[in-house]
Image: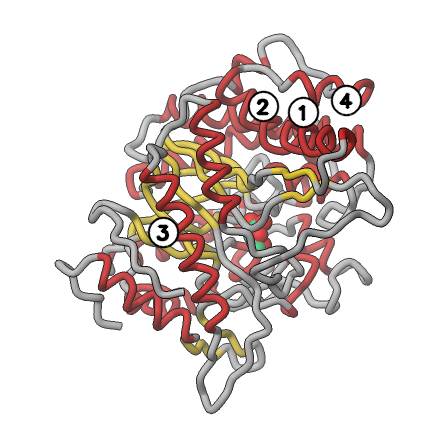
Amino acid sequence: MTDFTQFPSSFTWGVATSAFQIEGGASADGKGPSIWDTFSHTPGKVIDGSNGDIACDHYHRYPEDVSIMSGLGVDAYRFSMAWARVQPQGKGAWNEAGFAFYDRLLTELESKGIAAHVTLYHWDLPQGLQDEGGWLNRDTAYHFAEYAAEVARRFGNRLKTIATHNEPWCTANLGYGNAQFAPGVADLKQSIQVSHHLVLSHGLAMSAMRKVGSSAQLGIVLNQWTADPATDSAADIAAAEFEYSRSVEWFMDPIFKGKYPELALKVHGDNAPEVQDGDLAIAHQKIDFLGVNYYFRAFCSTETPPRQPECKLGKTDMGWEIFPDGLTELLLKLHAAYELPPIYITENGMANPDTIVNGEIPDEARIDFVQRHLKALNDARLQGVNIQGYFLWSLLDNFEWNSGYAKRFGIVHVDYATQKRTLKHSALWYKDYLVQQRPQRTAHAA
Ligand code: FCB
């Protein structure tokens, strides 16, 4: 696919990562353990038996990584802060050395003119809070708001955006629903209660950060998909409607409408969350931007075994269907249903079984994937959806949660034995593409 679409010159082009997946420095300079430290050190939880102790060693190599970004010519970098690095127990004392790391990182980004987009919570809850019940304990939402306010106080004016959560759907459904992610609980009722505490914590953090006041735009990042019935049977159609309601509307409705969606609430029945008076009013407050992470659609089949999609464009190394049309459809659907703030696509990309061939990494499949998704998002943009930017997941190959280092999402290859970074073809393509998008600017020197 070689279509070239010109985006507005104000469009933000970025790359994304998250703390646990790249930083390493698991106990450096007073950092406390997080639930992902605990989980990944528990035998059997991560497919390749790996952990995040060193990861991409970004904690020490951040100047090189920022320099790579600068060489690519990106406008913006989306990363997350490790809560346990700046507040080892998740409550109580702050760790100045932890804040100093993010201060150094921000200084480095500023020196290269790269805007910082920060996520406060990308799944690495301080273990100290997990020991008190984690997200199942309502108090965690209040501790989160204190942490959010402290970050806004210290760094707010240096950050372009602050997202409260990354993909609360995953925290609830994979962390508490099917035990695939930390803390490894499989209990539907608990997962739904956790999702409510996450929604509440988002609202509490928004209020706390607004009170501090800063120039950062405040919002949240949600992973979303369209849900298609596998056949036109009534059962598959109902399954698809429920899937969209329990996954997309479940997080969008409280934030944008101050209520949970009726369909999901009804199907959840006795598993519906305990919601205290005023919780939904806290959740329902203006956000300055919405981050959308898009990887695939949901394909809903009630047959056993479930019917699989045709996958006309193939699958990624995660086994995820490549379905760019779903991105257009999703954005149009959201646009029709909600009064949306500006949207950033905060993650999109693919895992590919990349290998080094004569010193190069020819990941043409990834280039094709990104081009198709950019076209799909531009289709939505041309139909009126206000999309301000795109962040490719990911800058670096990294620790892909329970898949460990076996899945490579980076546009930059990481040799974990030597920590050598090598630009893949997709990185070289992205760099050229950004030059084409902004002919008035030249890529920064690496
Ligand atoms: C998203 C996560 C991100 C990464 C990608 C592949 O769900 O936010 O950390 O794992 O998937």
CA–CA distance in space, label 1 to label 4: 24 Å
Point out the frontmost of discs 1 and 3. Answer: 1
Name the element at disc 2.
helix
Quarter-wise, where is residue 153 in the image?
A: top left
Label 1 packing within 10 angstroms: few (<14), some (14-19), many (20+): some
- Residue displayed at 53% across by 42% down: 166
Image quarter (top left, top right, bottom left or bottom right) of the C terminus: bottom left
Q: Amino acid at mark 3?
A: Asp
Disc 1 to disc 2: CB gap under 8 Å: yes
Quarter-wise, where is residue 61 in the image?
A: bottom left
Point out the frontmost of discs 4 and 2. Answer: 4
Label 2 packing within 10 angstroms: few (<14), some (14-19), many (20+): many
Name the element at disc 4.
helix
Q: Is residue 164 above or below residue 350?
A: above
Q: Amino acid at mark 4?
A: Val
Residue corresponding to mark 3: 103
Residue 74 vs residue 442: left or right? Answer: right
CA–CA distance in space, label 1 to label 3: 31 Å
Name the element at disc 1.
loop
Residue corresponding to mark 2: 200
Between 97 and 283, the one nearer to me in the picture:
283
Q: Which mark is residue 267?
A: 4
Q: Is mark 1 within 8 Å of ligand 1?
A: no
Name the element at disc 3.
helix
Where residue 310 appears, as percent x and y from the top left, is 66, 55
CA–CA distance in space, label 3 to label 4: 46 Å
Residue corresponding to mark 1: 138
